[in-house]
Image (tube, rainbow, N blue to C red):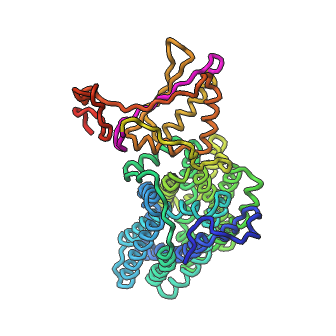
Amino acid sequence: MIRTMAQADPDPNLAPQPPSTLSSLRYPIFRAVWIASTVSNLGGQIQAVGAAWMMTSLADSADMVALVQASVALPIMLLSLFAGALADNLDRRGVMLAAQMFMLAVSVALAICAWTDLLTPWLLLLFTFLIGCGAAFNAPAWQASVGDMVPRGELPGAVTLNSMGFNIARSSGPAIGGVIVAAAGAAAAFAVNAVSYIALVVVLARWRRPPTTRLLPPETLRVAVTSGVRYVAMSPPIRVVLLRALVFGGGASPVLALMPLVAKTRIAGGPMTYGALLGAFGVGAVAGVMGSSRLRRKLSTEAFVRCACIGLAFATAVVGISSHLAVTMAALLLAGAGWVLALSTFNVTVQLAAPRWVVARALSIYQMTTFGGMAVGSWLCGVLAAHQGVGTSLLAAAAVLLACAALGFWRPLAQSEELNLDPLSQWEEPTTRPPVAPRSGPVVVTTEYVIRDEDTVEFLKAMAERRRVRRRDGALKWRIMRDLADPEIWVERYETPTWLDYLRHSNRLTQHDAALSERILALHAGPEPPRVRHMLERQTGTLPSTHAAHPPDLTEPLTDPTRSS
């Protein structure tokens, strides 16, 4: 049976070694899923070659060929956020298994339609779109599970190793796909892809994760989506990643989306040439991954990504200019390295900047942004290629990548490795004299501080950060107020919709947030700790006439009956 714990014991003799790209494979569950995913990715690359080359036969149009790549990226942009919410609130293994079985069924249907000559350009795009839908639901669950399979210190290597597995498939899959398409047609490539899902389905079906104890019930889909968007919006490090990834995706995708046309028009080749070009791209990506650990130790996160963007921009420009196979393949080696190093760094930065309760949603928003940029970039460059030529389109993409590198001077990526986002685990649910139901609310929380005049400026600076943290974790209507009768008294006030929302908000504090709380407490000059009050808002119309003798029952929501729920 597959080991289920992230801390499944590796060889103790290896434990003291510093983490490297390959050291994550010491953990059995990660190793098993990684190998199966690599096999599945290999089939996906074979299918991609078949779909792209078949489109050149069905519709000899640059924009239709580029839409093959866009049809895979578009569902990731549209569905990733909902997929992340499901991955954070349901069993991630189950989400992954359902997604893989769905893609298996779609791939079988695609192969059958290809064998029977029923495919049209738009039907092919529909099938690739559905496969993209399955990938959209699988990716957040898989990537969020990596942090459960390996320790935090191994996370950068594990994420980079995922990219390496994908690019091992990219380096060999296109070449294999080119041979299959040339020898047996695109339908055979689709059939091989369908078979490739079986290994991962078997691994996931055998994986028995230990049951996890939830202190609070899972959020509804609507609440989970809202919480994820709010957290990302209130997290400056993640916002910077999204901006850079959006621009990078728009500039990076054309080199792959237009690759069939590069092979066919600029180099005058066939399926084998196309497979060789993508193979060179994949080999470069694997080489970049193998050298990434040493580069990360020498460069900051921002410098690392900036170099990757510049290298990919240079390579994209060469691909757009060159008409020689050897020169183009050499450029694609550099392009593959720049592509994988930038995207894996974006992914790691998001994972290290998000706590476990929201990591799948943060990753899904990152993927939605990145693949949204890729979908738009692929489409625009396809249109530009149709009117101005493939070379001009790729030169424009190179300019976008240089803009992404220059953007780092204005919005640099943060160093997130030192953030400790483990739960604080010091908060205890307050005792209430009357019983309070989880759905009772709204809840009003106030905290009273005593702040000396000379500490007022420092206190307000700290409270500005406290406001961001409170709102990030779900607080509403945050306010800071000063007592006019005693100017040393300051009151922090915020609300949550229900008591359950307040419990969720309070349990989301992290070890990193503790430093801010300690900073604020150090400024408190009162003889006693700050006084915290928990109150339920209610309307006078709900008060029973005998409320003085009989305290109201707080097990039901306390709301005005004239208000809409």
Determine the residue positioned at 55% across, 27% down: 530
| Depth order, front residue of 197/106 | 197
> Residue 134, relative to residue 376: is it above or below?
below
Residue 374 place in picture, x, y as percent = 51, 58
**Which quadrant would the C terminus be assigned to in this image?**
top left
Give the image location of residue 92, x and y in percent: 47, 64
Front residue (pair 25, 129): 25
- Whether residue 459 is visible to the viewer of this picture, yes or no, is yes
Residue 324, image x, y percentages: 66, 72
Residue shown at 67% from the left, 42% from the top: 409
Q: Residue at x 47, y 82 (%)?
A: 195
Q: How many marks?
A: 0
Residue 327 seen by the camera:
no
Image: 317 above or below 452: below
Query: Magenta residues, as a range?
Result: 435-455
What is the quadrant of the N terminus in the image?
bottom right
Q: Nearer the viewer, residue 404 or 238?
A: 238
Tell whether position 445 is magenta: yes
